[in-house]
Image (tube, helix red, strand yellow):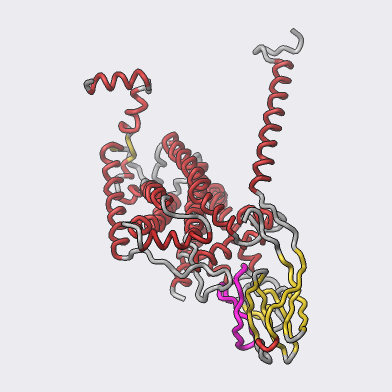
Amino acid sequence: MTAGSLQRWLAERAPIPKQWLERPFKEELPVHLKTWVWAFGGTPLLFFAIQVVTGILLTFYYVPYPLHAYESVRQITFAIRFGWFVRGIHQAASQLMFVAVLLHMIRVFATRAFRAPRELTWVIGVSLFLLTLGFAFTGYSLVYDQLSYWATTVGTNMIAEVPLVGRPLLYLLRGGPDVNPNTLSRFYNFHIGVVPTLFVLLVGMHILLIRLHGVAPLEGDPRRETYHFFPDHVLREISVGLVALLAVVVYVMLHPPGLGERADPNLTPPHIRPEWYFFPSYRWLKMVPLQVGLWTSVAFVTSMFLWPWIDAVLERLAPGRRLGTIVGVAGWLFTLTLLVWEAFS
Amino acid sequence: MPGEGPHGGGRREFLANLVLGIAGFLALGGFASRFFSFLYPMVPPDQLIEVPAASRDQIPRNGGLVVNLPVGHVALVDADGELRAFSAICTHLGCIVKWQPAAGHVWYCPCHKGTYDREGRVVSGPPPRPLQRYAVAIRDGKVYVKLPYRPPVLPA
């Protein structure tokens, strides 16, 4: 069978219109995208793909049951061939995925690409950001060392403070009133089933909306020239991806993953601290009463979701003053201050 | 036909859609409620039980101790000869407090630096409530504590 006849055979069995396949490659992009800053949109997806591959590999050895979870992670890290490498990549890429999502969000925020009619793309993006945190939180809990166990206890306990539905929600999440064997299997399920499924669905919607709307025009840029998505932009994205991949591998070679002490439900360790991306929330909870901490966190997340509309209202109140940008930057700086404060305290 | 609209729809089509809609809604609701019940844990009610927690001489005068029992975590404190028992679970976010006497407090939570005095009252930090107090009795040199016991959740 020649290549031509194979192509014909395939075209008859899967009659996909040729222009559907060709259209994304022939797309023209506005020229302001032709900088490295705009080449980071694909990196969160690249890191997600790395997580899927290394995550599937880890499931071959990980046992989601309290008696065996820690031991299985120990075996993966110290006994199984290249276990340290696979787990290290999974861990490092998860951190970089968070950074990539955050950088992408900051870029969209700074260029106000969330404005009408692209509000829904932003809302889905914020959901993806929260799901990324969900990946990190549930994944960290699976290690079942001291910090992982107590981070799960503390993190889930916050939900109990929500009026009326808090306790039932907590029971549903933990599979009981306390952290128990059901909790681990539930978190495992969230980590490898529920969260990835939602993530893939939302990424699909996010990309579809971006394609339907086209790239957001850049405020104050009079240029009307375009350039090719393929190969120009794709090559730039691939370059960024390869550098990111190299950075992950080098990081893991230099800092192979470790493992703390086995989880002890009878002893909260001293100096307990979550992963660095939860530092702002951790520092905030230490500073303010619990109810204040809870409701300000809810308000913060809600304002992230509603940001396109909040920005529009602020724009109407003071046209041309970029009040939204000022408020938003103040919010970002406050969060960053909490993070740095906790990191160096 | 009476009631028929310009697109051949009309009352009959509306009723058919309505019945289908209600049936679909009930079917989905039926599935959803059963799936929810499946996921919601079977939590047996708490029982108040009395258990031996420590021997009396383990807690020195004005000293304290956290005891981890299979049925719960208990914080015992001697206040000028009077023994008191509390839940050792911090009321902030559920970590276990430590005996760490310092200026004004005796219990310290390592998670968010909450502190409590020997009455179980919050001294500093973010805990919203005092430590839960348990009834305590001393018999034959042993300390007995009455605490709510939660039988294990199924399946465990």
Q: Is A164 a magenta residue?
A: no
Q: Is B107 a magenta residue?
A: yes
Residue A80 horizontal/vertical position (percent): 35, 58
Q: Is residue A166 above or below residue B20?
A: below
Side of B2 where A133 appears, left or right: left
The part of the image, by quadrant, that contains residue A299 is: bottom right
Side of B141 where A38 appears, left or right: left
Residue B22 horizontal/vertical position (percent): 71, 28
For this rendering, which residue is in front, A101 or B45?
Answer: B45
Quadrant placement of the N terminus of chain A: top left
For this rendering, which residue is in front, A143 or A309?
Answer: A143
Side of A9 where A165 appears, left or right: right
Residue farthest to the top?
B1
- How many numbered dots are placed on residues in this image? 0
Q: Is residue B67 above or below residue A75?
A: below
Can residue A326 be seen here? The reply is no
For this rendering, which residue is in front, A27 or A156?
Answer: A156
Residue drawn at (32%, 35%) of the image: A28
Residue drawn at (68%, 41%) of the image: B34
Residue farthest to the front?
B140
Side of A39 where B16 appears, left or right: right
Range of residues picked out in magenta? B94-113
Residue drawn at (26%, 43%) of the image: A235
Can residue B19 be seen here? The reply is yes
Residue A320 horizontal/vertical position (percent): 48, 51
Residue B92 horizontal/vertical position (percent): 64, 69
